[in-house]
Amino acid sequence: ILEDNRHLLEIMKDALMEYETIDSDQIDDIMQGKTPRPPMGWSDSDNGGSGATPVEDEVAKPRAETSPDGQSGPIGGPAGEH
C-alpha cells in the first residue's frame, strides 16, 4: 500500500516540512493528488516556522505562593516540608 501511494506520502512529507502540521482540508488535497493549500491563518511571513512569536528570554524567578492555610513559602519543595 505504501509503495502504491508513495507519491501521496511525498506530498504529505513536503507539506509537513513546510507547515509542521496539516489539517483535514490539506489531507483532502493530498489524497486528491493536489499540492495542499496553506493552513487557515498562514501567511508567507511565517517562513515555515512554528508560528510562535519569538519572546525574549526571561530569567525564571522563584516566587512565594500562599498555601491554603494562609502561610507563604516556595512551591515545589520536598513533601515532608509542607
Image (cartoon, helix red, strand yellow):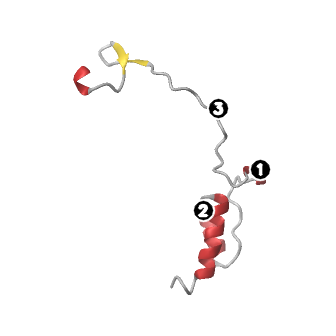
Q: What amino acid is found at the position of numbered circle 3 in the picture? A: Glu
* Amino acid type indicated by mark 1: Ser
Residue type highlighted by circle 2: Asp
Answer with the quarter of the image where residue 12 lies. bottom right
In the image, 57 versus 50, the foreground residue is: 57
Task: Check the image and report above or below for 2 versus 47.
Answer: below
- Check disc 3 and report the residue beneath it: 56
Q: Residue at x 33, y 13 (%)?
A: 70
Separation of residues labelled 1 and 3 (CA atoms) = 20 Å
For mark 1, give the secondary structure: helix
User: How many residues crowd mark 1 within 10 Å: few (<14), some (14–19), many (20+)?
Assistant: few
Q: Are marks 1 and 3 in contact (CB under 8 Å)?
A: no
User: Of label 1 and label 2, which has the lower sequence position?
Assistant: 2
Q: Nearer the viewer, mark 3 or mark 2?
A: 3
Work out which residue is located at the far left of the displayed protein and give it. 80
Residue at screen point 65% across, 59% down: 19
Expressed as whole percent of the image width and height from the top left, the position of residue 35 reads: 71, 72
- As measured in the structure, the alpha-carbon distance from the residue carrying label 3 to the one carrying label 2 is 30 Å
Q: Which residue is mark 2?
A: 23
